[in-house]
Image (spheres, rainbow, N blue to C red):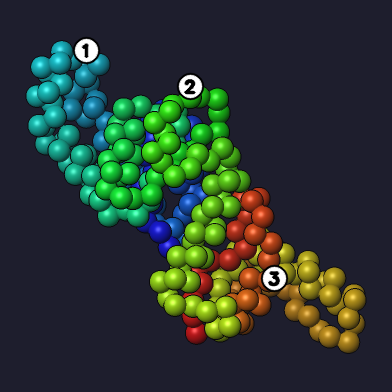
Amino acid sequence: MAKIYVASSWRNQYQQEVVKVLRTLGHEVYDFKNPPGRTGFQWSEVDPNWQNWTTEQYREALSHPVAIAGFNSDFNAMQSADICVMVLPCGRSANTEAGWMAGAGKRVFVYSTEKQEPELMYKIYERVLCSIDELTELFINKSNEMIIKQKGIDLNDQVRVVLTEYGANSINKRNTQYNKTYPTINWKMDYKEGDALHGQLWMVLSRFSFDAGGMVPFLNLEKL
């Protein structure tokens, strides 16, 4: 599991989808719109007339307790995260956050599903992801890769995973076909979401396809 900071704009229509997909893949994701224990920071909390501020008023507002609390929430999450996903289109805040995280040695990915003005300096970042499929493919692999590395799991080790609805349906479909092909073997065909699957890691992984299709077959990979 990775700790991921999703940087974007309040007006971005893709941000919530990215947060949901990454959480479904088992990662710990910071959502600046819904941070733990509080609501997301907005300048209107400081002053409803914030859009008409002078530069001096803006500078003074940076010291407002609400602004300080909002900054601390986001910046603490940036510091503790392993990875940043910057979701375009976005503004100065998200670009500042992604730049700081890259400078701090963290991995940064740019997620852009619609046409944007080209930006040369995004070469600083690791990769531009152009679709939800590319995001899912990368972080499915990264999820399993990081868990395997952290827990010291070998392909021959016995493991346990928890099936998603997609994973359960996939196995049931495959086992139905096996029962037709090998009628003397009784393959289980009633797996459901939340069921556990056990076996050697290489055998578990071989039960599923990990193509970039946005579907997650299992969660909670654990070594037995």
The correct choice, above or below, for 96 with respect to 19 in the image is above
Tag 1, which secondary structure?
A: helix
Residue 195: mark: none
x and y percentages locating residue 3 in the rendered image = 37, 56
Who is closer to the viewer here, 14 or 107? 107
Circles 3 and 2 in contact, beta carbons < 8 Å: no
Upstream in sequence: badge 3 or badge 1 = 1
x and y percentages locating residue 37 in the rendered image = 26, 50
What residue would you read off at disc 1?
Answer: 52
x and y percentages locating residue 201 in the rendered image = 59, 77
Res. 210 image quadrant: bottom right
Residue 207: mark: 3
> Residue at 62% of width from left, 63% of height from top?
217
Amino acid, disc 3: Arg
Crowd band around label 2 with a 10 angstrom C-alpha radius: few (<14), some (14–19), many (20+):
few
Amino acid, disc 2: Glu
In the image, taking residue 23 as reference, residue 155 lies left or right, namely right
In the image, taking residue 124 as reference, residue 169 lies left or right, namely right
Crowd band around label 3 with a 10 angstrom C-alpha radius: few (<14), some (14–19), many (20+):
few
**How much space separates mark 3 and mark 1, taking CA atoms?**
59 Å
x and y percentages locating residue 174 in the rendered image = 78, 69
Tag 3, which secondary structure?
A: loop
What residue would you read off at disc 2?
Answer: 117
In the image, taking residue 95 as reference, residue 183 lies left or right, namely right
